[in-house]
Amino acid sequence: MSNQLQQLYERSAGWLWSDKLRNASRVRHSLVMTLRIVFVLVRQLMQGQLNLRAMSLVYTTLLSLVPLLAFSFSVLKGFGVHNQLEPALLGFFEPLGPEGAELTQRIIGFVDRVDVGVLGSLGLGFLLYTVVSLTQKVEESFNFVWQVDRLRSFAERFSSYLSVIMIGPVLVFTALGVTATVMNTSLVQELMEVEPFGHLIVLASKLIPYVLVIAAFTFVYMFVPNTRVKLAPAAIGGLVAGVLWQASGWGFAAFIASSSKYAAIYSGFAILILMLIWLYIGWLILLLGAQVAFYVQHSEYVTREPVQLRLSNRLQEHLVLQIMFLVADNYIKQRDPWTLDELVQHLGLPMQPIHRVLRLLVDSGVLSETGGEPPAYLPRRDIDTITVAALLDVARSAGETRMLAKATLPYQAQVAGTMETIRKAVEAELGEQTLRDLVTQSHAADSD
């Protein structure tokens, strides 16, 4: 059976990637690209990283659910819309069936009993930590999907997370309240008595919750990852996640929550098991939608084989010199320093390897990060003292540690002699050429 499945996989993959899209019609191009994205999504799920991160988010959610709702409840209470928290939570747990209503009542009971004044500074700090850790884990998971190594700075994280925790619920419930108010106005009521407007308004009122869910997913996909996400890919990812959310809610309620096997096996723990499964499905859908948005924006990653973002030694040396050349060139011409996003756009490479080389140059004391957001990069030393040979040595020694370095290898005279010959040849060829010399030679060549 496994051999047959492997043959089927190879045939389908061969057909899918043998199709030439350059001269294909728009409809065929969209269809084939959709199938390819589905293919790489299945492959991504089989690798297991998204599943593991969804499980991690489930665990963090269990710790932070009550504190998060407590903070949201206090903020909503200040705006007079706290009564809508329970219906929203009930809607989230609706696929759990009757157990969902019971679980909602228990959580609301916990929230009502949370007294911040009794907790003290240590307890309040723990509540804040659990809430912030959830938002930080979400950002880390999204950065993994978008292949971004760098988290936001502490100050930006604190302000962004606080905005999400305090302002996000207010905006959501305000939108729901405005929608309900508009639907109850006299003008809308009069229009509902006139056909076909009445039928269209009823249909629109049924579609509004789905539109709000898709809009919420789109908002998350645009602003949570620590990179620039375009509106169109985020909206497509939000649409896919919204459809999966509604479909999975229906399927969960029909085939899992209504099953008597869970109650028979787990008895009183059945409600907890169902909640864990539903939370896992929800987080997995959120990450899948983010992955769709990533593949739509970066179609070059939609390949038959997984893209390996490992730099070869040659490419790493080349990238080190090219980045230092660009930084020094802007420094000499007194232009604005380069940022990570600008280097990614200019070099046409993925963000992850470029960021890895920038971290290497910063850690080696060649580059320095500015304190702005996003940070820019400047030479840390006088470019007249940075030699090209030293930059090549920085690239070649990347990854060496005390436990894994040249000194830990057993000595072999012939190998050591050959390596020393290569080093001397490089130094003899490059001489004392500095970073400034490299840039000025380029300027001279351009003027000629």
Image (cartoon, rainbow, N blue to C red):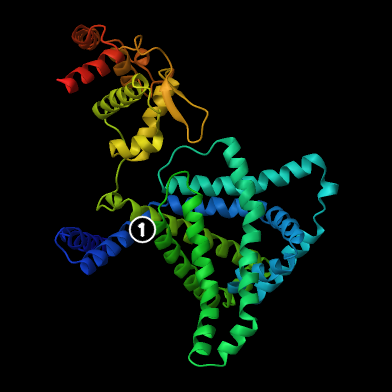
Percent coordinates x, y for residue 266 in the rendering? 63, 67
**Residue nearest the observer in this picture, 160 or 362:** 160
Residue at image point 65% right, 68% down = 88
Q: Quadrant of the C terminus?
A: top left
Q: In the displayed structure, would residue 168 be above or below residue 83?
A: above
**Residue nearest the observer in this picture, 401 or 129:** 129
Residue at image point 63% right, 73% down = 263
**Residue nearest the observer in this picture, 131 or 370:** 370
10 Å crowding of disc 1: few (<14), some (14-19), many (20+)? some
Q: In the displayed structure, would residue 213 be above or below residue 62?
A: below
User: What's the residue type where badge 1 is placed?
Assistant: Leu
Q: Say whether residue 188 is visible.
A: yes
Describe the element under mark 1 as helix, strand or loop.
helix
Q: In the picture provided, is 125 more to the left or to the right than 35?
A: right
**Residue nearest the observer in this picture, 91 or 442:** 442
Residue at image point 62% right, 43% down = 159
Quickly name the residue at label 1: 41
